Image (tube, grey):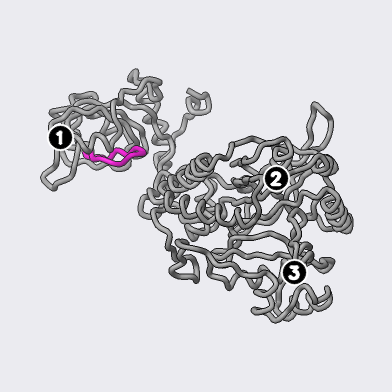
Amino acid sequence: MPKTILKKAAIDINDEREIRLRKLMALMADGVQPYPAAVTRTERLASAIAKKHGARVQIAGRLMSKREMGKLTFGHLQDESGRIQIVLRADQVKDPLYQRFVNQIDIGDILAVTGERFVTKKGEESVLVNTWTLLAKAVRPLPDKFHGLKDEDLRLRKRYLDLLLDGELRDLFRRKARFWQSTREFLAREGFLEVETPVLEVTAGGADAAPFITHHNALDMDVYLRISNGELWQKRLMVAGFEKTFEIGRQFRNEGISREHLQDYTQMEFYWAYADYRDGMTLVRRLYQHVIQAAFGKLKFDIGQFTAVDLSGEWPTISFVETIKKIVGVDVLRAGDKALKQKLQDLNIEYERKATGGRLMDALWKHCRKKIKGPVFLIDLPVSVSPLAKRKADNPLLTERYQVILAGTEVGNGYSELNDPVDQAARFSEQQALRESGDKEAQMFDHDFVEALEYGMPPTTGFGVSERLFSVLEDKPIRECVLFPLCRPS
């Protein structure tokens, strides 16, 4: 036992933790090991519940309730699979085991139980206990079952308790696991190879975002945590002769927290050689419909202000330029920075005062996006907001890029990849100039990637989707859909 526990002298009987510590020491004094390694369990509770009455079971779980009625003591055990009532009779469980259970076992303790299946007079499926073993003594009491953890910060900080007490929350993360597993299965069936690319990079690339910086001691240099799931690395694989690759992993962006944004989160990106953005849209629609059906068992959702959002069937396309013009009356390709700033001010939209061109267009678009129910593919995005996408042959001011828009939110981004090294170098130069003028989210000039393109990359389409899609479908803030979101130290 830790010395800090054994040295407790004066015990405040009004302090639940102190009372439990006293019980713990009493158990140890009686020769009971309160944290044994061996576990006697032959089945989970769901399996035990399915057994016939009279069948012998050996189960284990956390005690979630306890009440005494004379010579009977009732409780409920819970494991990941379910919950079942246990019943201890004084004439069935001989002392000292019966009195030890009554006097020294608390709600929250983890037990192994051996007994027989039966049903009570009230019709509750139960186990009549023959013997029990303590597996772990809970020194701290669980939150009150009627009030639980109401404070949002406390719930996220003590997520393990939130998950323990909320079965619906546990189900959410089972859906999330199916979401990513079905993504992996779908792409593998389509012939994509799963790859792993570096998390630490000398040049942070593949997205417009501020990176986290850390120091590599062995090489004595600063490096960046990746801001994309290996976009520029997977394109190098296209140069190398691979034709279909994907990666599911964590990426990191040193930006603000909002309903839709986290600093570290899971994303999937795929790259497909000898295909363009039109091929990508067809594949993405099929991917989304497969994954969403697998995870949620449906394709129709109510999300925020939008009702009956239906992801089945074909999805229409809408134009970036024409949609903004329709909603706010501005042609972003013709309007200069001054006009764009004036419109943003008229609409009370916040923007960086030093912002120009693409940043101003993007701020205006995000205002318009909130009105779109979807699902739709947003297409024809300008070059100024698409530094890695191929220009359209019929309009070099626009790109072969698309986004998936759902319930006013962007939940996926893809394009025909730029494979012209001269054009790519020029766009990197423009991004570098923006960065040097103070735009921390502008992309860095990746000379090594440009060199790779000079060896020749086939026509390629790429696409990325993050766990934002899952949180939108759950209609919850993204922090609520992460097992352990980052919190300030308490």
Q: Residue at x 79, y 29 (%)?
A: 217
Secondary structure of the residue carrying tag 1 is loop
Residue type at mark 1? Lys
Q: Main secondary structure of the magenta part?
A: strand
Instruction: Say which element carries label 3.
Output: helix
Q: Is residue 140 left or right of residue 280?
A: left
Say which label, 2 or 1, has the lower sequence index. Answer: 1
What residue do we see at 14% from left, 46% from top? 123
Which of the numbered marks, if any, corresponds to residue 231? 2
Classify residue 193 as left or right of residue 77.
right
In three-dimensional space, the C-alpha distance between marks 2 and 1, rounded to whole angstroms, equals: 56 Å
Q: Which residue is mark 1?
A: 52
Q: Earlier in the sequence, mark 3 or mark 2?
A: 2
Q: Residue furthest top?
A: 31
Q: Which mark is residue 73?
A: none
- Mark 3 sits on what residue? 361
Of circles 2 and 1, the one toward us is 2
Q: Quadrant of residue 255?
A: bottom right
- Please, is residue 15 above or below residue 473 in the view? above
- Marks 1 and 3 sit apart, C-alpha to C-alpha, by 66 Å
- Residue 90 in the image: x percent, y percent? 16, 30
**Residues rendered magenta in the picture:** 74-85
Nearer to me, 67 or 484: 484
Say if residue 319 shows up in the picture. yes
